[in-house]
Amino acid sequence: MRSIFTALLVPSALAFPSLFSSTDANPLPLVIWHGLGDNFANEGIQDVAALAEEVNPGTYVYIIRLGGDDDPSADRSATFFGNLTTQIEQVCEALRQEPIIGSAPAINALGFSQGGQFLRGYIERCNAPPVKNLVTFGSQHNGIAEFQHCGLTDWLCKGAMALLRGNTWSSFVQNRLVPAQYYRSVNETTGEPTEEYLGFSNFLADINNERDIKNKTYAKNLASLSNFAMYVFANDTVAIPKESGHFAQVTNLTNGTVTPLQDRRIYKEDWIGLKKLDKKGALHFKNVEGEHMHLNDEDLRQAFKEFFGPTSKSALGKVQEYLKYQELK
Ligand SMILES: *[C@@H]1O[C@H](CO)[C@@H](O)[C@H](O)[C@H]1NC(C)=O
Ligand SMILES: *[C@@H]1O[C@H](CO)[C@@H](O)[C@H](O)[C@H]1NC(C)=O
Ligand SMILES: *[C@@H]1O[C@H](CO)[C@@H](O)[C@H](O)[C@H]1NC(C)=O
Ligand SMILES: *[C@@H]1O[C@H](CO)[C@@H](O)[C@H](O)[C@H]1NC(C)=O
Ligand SMILES: *[C@@H]1O[C@H](CO)[C@@H](O)[C@H](O)[C@H]1NC(C)=O
Ligand SMILES: *[C@@H]1O[C@H](CO)[C@@H](O)[C@H](O)[C@H]1NC(C)=O
Protein backbone atom coordinates (compact mmCIF):
# COMPACT_ATOMS: atom_id res chain seq x y z
CA MET A 1 0.00 0.00 0.00
CA ARG A 2 1.17 3.48 -0.71
CA SER A 3 2.00 5.59 2.25
CA ILE A 4 -0.74 8.01 3.00
CA PHE A 5 -0.23 11.76 3.19
CA THR A 6 3.19 11.77 1.50
CA ALA A 7 1.79 13.95 -1.21
CA LEU A 8 0.45 16.36 1.34
CA LEU A 9 3.67 17.01 3.18
CA VAL A 10 4.35 20.65 2.60
CA PRO A 11 7.87 21.89 2.29
CA SER A 12 8.39 24.81 4.59
CA ALA A 13 6.87 28.02 3.32
CA LEU A 14 10.39 29.37 2.90
CA ALA A 15 11.23 26.68 0.41
CA PHE A 16 8.29 27.79 -1.65
CA PRO A 17 9.83 30.45 -3.92
CA SER A 18 12.02 27.85 -5.59
CA LEU A 19 8.96 25.80 -6.44
CA PHE A 20 7.94 27.98 -9.35
CA SER A 21 11.29 29.32 -10.40
CA SER A 22 11.99 29.86 -14.07
CA THR A 23 13.23 26.32 -14.61
CA ASP A 24 9.65 25.06 -14.80
CA ALA A 25 10.83 21.59 -13.90
CA ASN A 26 8.09 21.32 -11.34
CA PRO A 27 4.55 20.50 -12.33
CA LEU A 28 1.77 22.82 -11.25
CA PRO A 29 0.03 22.11 -7.95
CA LEU A 30 -2.98 19.85 -8.26
CA VAL A 31 -6.35 20.40 -6.60
CA ILE A 32 -8.70 17.42 -6.23
CA TRP A 33 -12.42 17.58 -5.48
CA HIS A 34 -13.86 14.21 -4.46
CA GLY A 35 -17.35 12.88 -5.05
CA LEU A 36 -20.61 12.23 -3.20
CA GLY A 37 -20.23 10.26 0.03
CA ASP A 38 -16.45 10.52 0.03
CA ASN A 39 -14.20 12.58 2.30
CA PHE A 40 -10.74 14.12 1.95
CA ALA A 41 -9.12 11.70 4.41
CA ASN A 42 -10.29 8.52 2.71
CA GLU A 43 -7.60 6.13 1.66
CA GLY A 44 -8.84 5.99 -1.94
CA ILE A 45 -8.46 9.70 -2.50
CA GLN A 46 -5.14 9.79 -0.65
CA ASP A 47 -3.90 7.04 -2.95
CA VAL A 48 -4.87 9.09 -5.98
CA ALA A 49 -2.93 12.02 -4.55
CA ALA A 50 0.10 9.79 -4.05
CA LEU A 51 -0.20 8.47 -7.59
CA ALA A 52 -0.31 12.01 -9.01
CA GLU A 53 2.91 12.74 -7.14
CA GLU A 54 4.49 9.52 -8.36
CA VAL A 55 3.64 10.16 -12.02
CA ASN A 56 4.76 13.80 -11.93
CA PRO A 57 7.32 14.07 -9.11
CA GLY A 58 7.21 17.35 -7.28
CA THR A 59 3.45 17.78 -7.65
CA TYR A 60 1.95 19.47 -4.63
CA VAL A 61 -1.53 18.01 -4.09
CA TYR A 62 -4.36 19.67 -2.19
CA ILE A 63 -7.58 17.77 -1.58
CA ILE A 64 -10.58 20.03 -1.20
CA ARG A 65 -12.34 19.70 2.16
CA LEU A 66 -15.39 21.45 3.51
CA GLY A 67 -15.86 21.73 7.24
CA GLY A 68 -12.27 22.10 8.39
CA ASP A 69 -8.98 20.26 8.28
CA ASP A 70 -9.76 17.84 11.10
CA ASP A 71 -13.28 16.84 10.29
CA PRO A 72 -13.68 14.18 7.59
CA SER A 73 -17.26 13.48 8.65
CA ALA A 74 -18.26 17.12 8.17
CA ASP A 75 -16.58 16.96 4.77
CA ARG A 76 -18.59 13.86 3.84
CA SER A 77 -21.78 15.41 5.10
CA ALA A 78 -21.14 18.46 2.90
CA THR A 79 -21.24 16.22 -0.17
CA PHE A 80 -24.94 15.61 0.59
CA PHE A 81 -26.05 18.76 2.39
CA GLY A 82 -25.40 22.41 1.70
CA ASN A 83 -25.94 25.28 -0.69
CA LEU A 84 -23.52 24.93 -3.60
CA THR A 85 -23.25 28.67 -4.05
CA THR A 86 -21.90 28.90 -0.54
CA GLN A 87 -19.76 25.79 -0.85
CA ILE A 88 -18.03 27.07 -3.98
CA GLU A 89 -17.45 30.46 -2.33
CA GLN A 90 -15.83 28.63 0.58
CA VAL A 91 -13.60 26.67 -1.76
CA CYS A 92 -12.60 29.86 -3.61
CA GLU A 93 -11.61 31.37 -0.28
CA ALA A 94 -9.80 28.25 0.93
CA LEU A 95 -7.75 27.99 -2.27
CA ARG A 96 -6.86 31.67 -2.15
CA GLN A 97 -5.61 31.28 1.40
CA GLU A 98 -3.76 28.00 1.05
CA PRO A 99 -0.07 29.02 1.14
CA ILE A 100 1.13 27.11 -1.91
CA ILE A 101 -2.05 26.97 -4.00
CA GLY A 102 -2.86 30.61 -3.29
CA SER A 103 0.48 31.87 -4.58
CA ALA A 104 0.84 29.54 -7.55
CA PRO A 105 0.70 31.19 -10.98
CA ALA A 106 -1.76 28.48 -12.04
CA ILE A 107 -3.03 25.11 -10.84
CA ASN A 108 -4.34 21.89 -12.33
CA ALA A 109 -7.66 20.42 -11.22
CA LEU A 110 -9.05 16.90 -10.96
CA GLY A 111 -12.72 16.33 -10.24
CA PHE A 112 -14.33 13.03 -9.40
CA SER A 113 -18.02 12.64 -10.14
CA GLN A 114 -19.91 15.67 -8.73
CA GLY A 115 -16.55 17.22 -7.78
CA GLY A 116 -15.99 17.66 -11.53
CA GLN A 117 -18.87 20.01 -12.13
CA PHE A 118 -18.10 21.81 -8.88
CA LEU A 119 -14.52 22.50 -10.00
CA ARG A 120 -15.99 23.84 -13.22
CA GLY A 121 -18.07 26.11 -11.00
CA TYR A 122 -14.88 27.26 -9.29
CA ILE A 123 -13.32 28.07 -12.68
CA GLU A 124 -16.34 29.91 -14.00
CA ARG A 125 -16.98 31.92 -10.85
CA CYS A 126 -13.56 32.55 -9.28
CA ASN A 127 -10.60 31.04 -11.09
CA ALA A 128 -8.06 32.69 -8.78
CA PRO A 129 -5.56 31.06 -8.92
CA PRO A 130 -6.48 30.12 -12.49
CA VAL A 131 -6.86 26.49 -13.53
CA LYS A 132 -4.72 25.44 -16.48
CA ASN A 133 -5.91 21.88 -17.07
CA LEU A 134 -9.20 20.43 -15.85
CA VAL A 135 -9.77 16.68 -15.81
CA THR A 136 -13.10 15.17 -14.73
CA PHE A 137 -14.01 11.52 -14.21
CA GLY A 138 -17.64 10.38 -14.29
CA SER A 139 -18.98 13.90 -13.75
CA GLN A 140 -22.49 15.17 -14.40
CA HIS A 141 -21.82 18.24 -16.51
CA ASN A 142 -25.28 18.11 -18.00
CA GLY A 143 -26.88 17.09 -14.74
CA ILE A 144 -28.59 13.92 -13.62
CA ALA A 145 -32.00 12.57 -14.58
CA GLU A 146 -32.26 10.19 -11.62
CA PHE A 147 -31.05 10.25 -8.06
CA GLN A 148 -28.40 7.99 -6.69
CA HIS A 149 -29.11 4.60 -5.19
CA CYS A 150 -27.68 4.53 -1.69
CA GLY A 151 -25.83 1.73 0.05
CA LEU A 152 -28.14 -0.37 2.26
CA THR A 153 -26.85 1.08 5.52
CA ASP A 154 -25.89 4.53 4.30
CA TRP A 155 -28.43 6.50 6.31
CA LEU A 156 -26.98 9.88 5.47
CA CYS A 157 -27.39 9.13 1.79
CA LYS A 158 -30.85 7.64 2.27
CA GLY A 159 -32.02 10.59 4.30
CA ALA A 160 -30.84 13.00 1.63
CA MET A 161 -32.44 11.07 -1.21
CA ALA A 162 -35.74 10.68 0.65
CA LEU A 163 -35.96 14.42 1.13
CA LEU A 164 -35.25 14.98 -2.54
CA ARG A 165 -38.01 12.97 -4.04
CA GLY A 166 -41.06 15.02 -4.76
CA ASN A 167 -39.54 18.24 -3.42
CA THR A 168 -36.74 18.75 -5.88
CA TRP A 169 -37.60 22.30 -6.84
CA SER A 170 -38.61 23.68 -3.46
CA SER A 171 -36.21 26.31 -2.20
CA PHE A 172 -35.83 24.26 0.97
CA VAL A 173 -34.33 21.41 -1.03
CA GLN A 174 -32.40 23.57 -3.50
CA ASN A 175 -30.80 25.34 -0.54
CA ARG A 176 -29.79 22.24 1.30
CA LEU A 177 -29.45 19.10 -0.81
CA VAL A 178 -26.43 18.94 -3.03
CA PRO A 179 -27.55 16.47 -5.75
CA ALA A 180 -30.81 18.39 -6.26
CA GLN A 181 -28.72 21.33 -7.41
CA TYR A 182 -27.49 19.45 -10.46
CA TYR A 183 -30.70 17.54 -11.15
CA ARG A 184 -31.97 18.48 -14.62
CA SER A 185 -35.46 17.72 -15.82
CA VAL A 186 -36.31 17.85 -19.51
CA ASN A 187 -39.47 17.67 -21.55
CA GLU A 188 -39.23 14.20 -23.03
CA THR A 189 -40.75 15.24 -26.34
CA THR A 190 -38.59 18.27 -27.02
CA GLY A 191 -35.52 17.48 -24.95
CA GLU A 192 -35.60 21.07 -23.68
CA PRO A 193 -35.18 21.75 -19.97
CA THR A 194 -38.38 22.28 -17.99
CA GLU A 195 -39.53 25.61 -16.63
CA GLU A 196 -39.05 24.35 -13.09
CA TYR A 197 -35.44 23.52 -13.73
CA LEU A 198 -34.72 26.85 -15.38
CA GLY A 199 -36.59 28.66 -12.64
CA PHE A 200 -35.31 26.92 -9.54
CA SER A 201 -32.06 25.05 -10.16
CA ASN A 202 -29.64 26.58 -7.68
CA PHE A 203 -26.48 25.46 -9.47
CA LEU A 204 -26.51 23.69 -12.82
CA ALA A 205 -28.82 25.98 -14.80
CA ASP A 206 -26.65 28.89 -13.72
CA ILE A 207 -23.24 27.35 -14.24
CA ASN A 208 -24.29 26.06 -17.69
CA ASN A 209 -25.64 29.51 -18.63
CA GLU A 210 -28.97 28.00 -19.63
CA ARG A 211 -31.04 31.00 -18.60
CA ASP A 212 -31.80 33.93 -20.92
CA ILE A 213 -29.19 36.18 -19.36
CA LYS A 214 -25.75 34.67 -19.86
CA ASN A 215 -22.77 35.44 -17.68
CA LYS A 216 -19.89 36.22 -20.04
CA THR A 217 -17.29 35.71 -17.31
CA TYR A 218 -18.26 32.04 -17.11
CA ALA A 219 -17.56 31.51 -20.81
CA LYS A 220 -14.37 33.55 -20.73
CA ASN A 221 -12.96 31.70 -17.74
CA LEU A 222 -13.74 28.23 -19.03
CA ALA A 223 -12.39 29.04 -22.50
CA SER A 224 -9.09 30.06 -20.91
CA LEU A 225 -8.26 26.44 -20.01
CA SER A 226 -5.38 24.79 -21.85
CA ASN A 227 -7.16 21.44 -21.63
CA PHE A 228 -10.53 20.20 -20.45
CA ALA A 229 -10.58 16.39 -20.46
CA MET A 230 -13.86 14.62 -19.67
CA TYR A 231 -13.72 10.92 -18.85
CA VAL A 232 -16.89 8.82 -18.99
CA PHE A 233 -17.12 5.32 -17.51
CA ALA A 234 -18.41 3.04 -20.24
CA ASN A 235 -20.31 0.81 -17.81
CA ASP A 236 -21.61 3.54 -15.52
CA THR A 237 -25.02 2.72 -14.05
CA VAL A 238 -24.82 5.17 -11.14
CA ALA A 239 -24.56 8.56 -12.83
CA ILE A 240 -27.68 8.58 -14.98
CA PRO A 241 -27.26 9.30 -17.78
CA LYS A 242 -23.52 8.66 -17.98
CA GLU A 243 -23.32 10.70 -21.23
CA SER A 244 -23.74 13.77 -19.03
CA GLY A 245 -20.00 13.42 -18.40
CA HIS A 246 -19.49 14.53 -22.02
CA PHE A 247 -22.15 17.26 -21.85
CA ALA A 248 -24.40 15.12 -24.04
CA GLN A 249 -28.15 15.19 -23.53
CA VAL A 250 -30.19 12.03 -23.28
CA THR A 251 -33.64 12.92 -24.46
CA ASN A 252 -35.34 9.59 -24.00
CA LEU A 253 -33.93 7.49 -21.16
CA THR A 254 -35.96 4.47 -22.25
CA ASN A 255 -34.58 4.23 -25.74
CA GLY A 256 -31.31 6.00 -25.07
CA THR A 257 -31.57 8.79 -27.63
CA VAL A 258 -28.44 10.89 -27.16
CA THR A 259 -27.78 14.37 -28.51
CA PRO A 260 -24.02 14.97 -28.51
CA LEU A 261 -22.67 18.26 -27.18
CA GLN A 262 -21.80 19.59 -30.65
CA ASP A 263 -25.47 19.42 -31.68
CA ARG A 264 -26.70 21.35 -28.66
CA ARG A 265 -27.27 25.09 -28.26
CA ILE A 266 -24.92 25.30 -25.28
CA TYR A 267 -22.16 24.48 -27.78
CA LYS A 268 -23.44 26.06 -30.98
CA GLU A 269 -24.12 29.41 -29.28
CA ASP A 270 -21.10 28.87 -27.04
CA TRP A 271 -22.83 29.72 -23.75
CA ILE A 272 -19.87 28.62 -21.61
CA GLY A 273 -16.85 28.59 -23.92
CA LEU A 274 -16.90 24.89 -24.85
CA LYS A 275 -16.91 25.61 -28.59
CA LYS A 276 -13.89 27.87 -28.22
CA LEU A 277 -12.09 25.13 -26.32
CA ASP A 278 -13.01 22.58 -28.97
CA LYS A 279 -11.81 24.80 -31.82
CA LYS A 280 -8.39 25.16 -30.24
CA GLY A 281 -8.17 21.39 -29.67
CA ALA A 282 -8.48 21.73 -25.90
CA LEU A 283 -11.67 19.71 -25.35
CA HIS A 284 -11.12 15.99 -24.89
CA PHE A 285 -13.87 13.36 -24.86
CA LYS A 286 -12.45 10.28 -23.15
CA ASN A 287 -13.94 6.89 -22.33
CA VAL A 288 -12.69 4.39 -19.79
CA GLU A 289 -13.92 0.88 -19.00
CA GLY A 290 -15.90 0.09 -15.92
CA GLU A 291 -18.64 1.08 -13.51
CA HIS A 292 -18.96 4.57 -11.99
CA MET A 293 -15.69 5.61 -10.34
CA HIS A 294 -14.14 2.18 -10.65
CA LEU A 295 -10.85 3.83 -11.46
CA ASN A 296 -7.80 1.88 -12.33
CA ASP A 297 -4.26 3.10 -11.85
CA GLU A 298 -3.41 2.78 -15.54
CA ASP A 299 -6.14 5.18 -16.66
CA LEU A 300 -5.17 7.63 -13.94
CA ARG A 301 -1.47 7.42 -14.79
CA GLN A 302 -2.27 8.05 -18.43
CA ALA A 303 -4.40 11.08 -17.58
CA PHE A 304 -1.81 12.52 -15.18
CA LYS A 305 0.93 12.12 -17.78
CA GLU A 306 -1.12 13.63 -20.55
CA PHE A 307 -2.59 16.59 -18.68
CA PHE A 308 -0.67 17.30 -15.48
CA GLY A 309 2.95 16.93 -16.60
CA PRO A 310 5.40 19.78 -16.09
CA THR A 311 5.09 22.35 -18.85
CA SER A 312 7.80 21.76 -21.37
CA LYS A 313 8.76 25.40 -21.70
CA SER A 314 8.55 28.32 -19.35
CA ALA A 315 6.64 31.39 -20.42
CA LEU A 316 9.95 33.24 -20.36
CA GLY A 317 11.46 30.62 -22.67
CA LYS A 318 8.59 31.10 -25.08
CA VAL A 319 9.06 34.87 -25.14
CA GLN A 320 12.78 34.46 -25.77
CA GLU A 321 12.06 32.04 -28.57
CA TYR A 322 9.59 34.47 -30.11
CA LEU A 323 12.09 37.34 -29.94
CA LYS A 324 14.75 35.21 -31.56
CA TYR A 325 12.31 34.32 -34.33
CA GLN A 326 11.55 38.02 -34.84
CA GLU A 327 15.28 38.77 -35.16
CA LEU A 328 15.77 36.05 -37.73
CA LYS A 329 13.03 37.38 -39.98
C1 LIG B 1 -20.94 36.74 -13.54
O1 LIG B 1 -20.14 35.94 -12.73
C2 LIG B 1 -19.10 36.67 -12.08
C3 LIG B 1 -18.22 35.65 -11.40
O2 LIG B 1 -18.97 34.87 -10.49
C4 LIG B 1 -19.74 37.65 -11.11
O3 LIG B 1 -18.73 38.40 -10.47
C5 LIG B 1 -20.65 38.58 -11.88
O4 LIG B 1 -21.36 39.41 -10.99
C6 LIG B 1 -21.66 37.80 -12.70
N1 LIG B 1 -22.33 38.71 -13.60
C7 LIG B 1 -23.64 38.73 -13.70
C8 LIG B 1 -24.19 39.67 -14.71
O5 LIG B 1 -24.36 38.02 -13.02
C1 LIG C 1 -27.68 29.82 -1.59
O1 LIG C 1 -26.83 30.77 -1.06
C2 LIG C 1 -26.75 31.94 -1.83
C3 LIG C 1 -25.60 32.78 -1.29
O2 LIG C 1 -25.66 32.87 0.09
C4 LIG C 1 -28.09 32.64 -1.77
O3 LIG C 1 -28.05 33.83 -2.50
C5 LIG C 1 -29.12 31.71 -2.39
O4 LIG C 1 -30.39 32.26 -2.27
C6 LIG C 1 -29.09 30.35 -1.73
N1 LIG C 1 -29.83 29.42 -2.54
C7 LIG C 1 -31.13 29.26 -2.49
C8 LIG C 1 -31.76 28.22 -3.36
O5 LIG C 1 -31.82 29.89 -1.72
C1 LIG D 1 -43.39 19.21 -23.81
O1 LIG D 1 -43.30 20.04 -24.96
C2 LIG D 1 -44.40 19.90 -25.81
C3 LIG D 1 -44.11 20.70 -27.10
O2 LIG D 1 -43.72 22.01 -26.77
C4 LIG D 1 -45.65 20.38 -25.08
O3 LIG D 1 -46.78 20.27 -25.93
C5 LIG D 1 -45.85 19.55 -23.82
O4 LIG D 1 -46.94 20.06 -23.07
C6 LIG D 1 -44.60 19.56 -22.98
N1 LIG D 1 -44.75 18.58 -21.91
C7 LIG D 1 -44.64 18.90 -20.63
C8 LIG D 1 -44.79 17.79 -19.65
O5 LIG D 1 -44.39 20.03 -20.27
C1 LIG E 1 -36.61 7.27 -29.23
O1 LIG E 1 -37.27 8.38 -28.66
C2 LIG E 1 -37.17 9.56 -29.45
C3 LIG E 1 -37.82 10.70 -28.74
O2 LIG E 1 -38.15 10.42 -27.44
C4 LIG E 1 -37.84 9.31 -30.79
O3 LIG E 1 -37.71 10.48 -31.58
C5 LIG E 1 -37.16 8.15 -31.48
O4 LIG E 1 -37.86 7.85 -32.66
C6 LIG E 1 -37.16 6.92 -30.59
N1 LIG E 1 -36.36 5.90 -31.23
C7 LIG E 1 -36.67 4.61 -31.21
C8 LIG E 1 -35.73 3.68 -31.90
O5 LIG E 1 -37.68 4.20 -30.64
C1 LIG F 1 -39.10 6.92 -25.56
O1 LIG F 1 -38.70 5.71 -26.16
C2 LIG F 1 -39.64 4.66 -25.95
C3 LIG F 1 -39.03 3.40 -26.54
O2 LIG F 1 -38.64 3.64 -27.88
C4 LIG F 1 -40.97 5.04 -26.56
O3 LIG F 1 -41.91 4.00 -26.29
C5 LIG F 1 -41.46 6.33 -25.96
O4 LIG F 1 -42.63 6.75 -26.61
C6 LIG F 1 -40.40 7.41 -26.11
N1 LIG F 1 -40.84 8.60 -25.40
C7 LIG F 1 -41.12 9.72 -26.00
C8 LIG F 1 -41.56 10.85 -25.13
O5 LIG F 1 -40.97 9.87 -27.22
C1 LIG G 1 -18.65 -3.01 -20.00
O1 LIG G 1 -19.73 -3.30 -20.85
C2 LIG G 1 -19.34 -3.92 -22.06
C3 LIG G 1 -20.53 -4.06 -22.97
O2 LIG G 1 -21.71 -3.67 -22.38
C4 LIG G 1 -18.71 -5.26 -21.75
O3 LIG G 1 -18.29 -5.88 -22.94
C5 LIG G 1 -17.51 -5.05 -20.84
O4 LIG G 1 -16.98 -6.29 -20.45
C6 LIG G 1 -17.89 -4.27 -19.61
N1 LIG G 1 -16.68 -3.92 -18.90
C7 LIG G 1 -16.59 -3.92 -17.59
C8 LIG G 1 -15.26 -3.56 -17.03
O5 LIG G 1 -17.53 -4.17 -16.88
Image: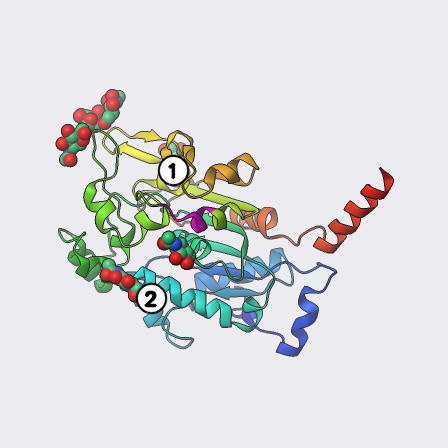
Badge 1 marks a residue whose secondary structure is helix
Q: Nearer the viewer, residue 276 or 233?
A: 276
* Left or right of 7, for residue 270: left
Q: Main secondary structure of the magenta part?
A: helix
Above or below: residue 160 compared with residue 117? below
Q: Residues within 10 Å of mark 1 (few under 14, many from 20)?
A: some
Q: Is residue 193 magenta?
A: no
Residue named by callout 2: 76
- Residue 266's label in the rendered image is 1
Estimate the x, y position of residue 54 in percent, counting from the top left. Answer: 61, 59
State the image coordinates of residue 46 (x, y, percent, origin top left): 48, 64
**Image region (quadrant) for ligand 6:** top left
Q: Tell me if I can see residue 211 in this picture.
A: yes
Question: Which contiguous range is marked in magenta?
Answer: 214-219
Colour scheme used in the picture? rainbow
In the picture, the quarter occupied by the C terminus is top right
In the displayed structure, does residue 300 sit left or right of residue 265? right
Mark 1 lies within 8 Å of ligand 1 (Cβ measured): no
Mark 2 touches mark 1? (CB < 8 Å): no
Q: Nearer the viewer, mark 2 or mark 1?
A: 1
Visible in this render: residue 158? no
How far apart marks 2 and 1 lie (CA) works out to 32 Å
Determine the residue positioned at 52% across, 40% down. Answer: 277
Name the kind of residue labelled 2 in the image.
Arg
Q: Earlier in the sequence, mark 2 or mark 1?
A: 2
Number of numbered discs present? 2
Local SS, label 2: helix
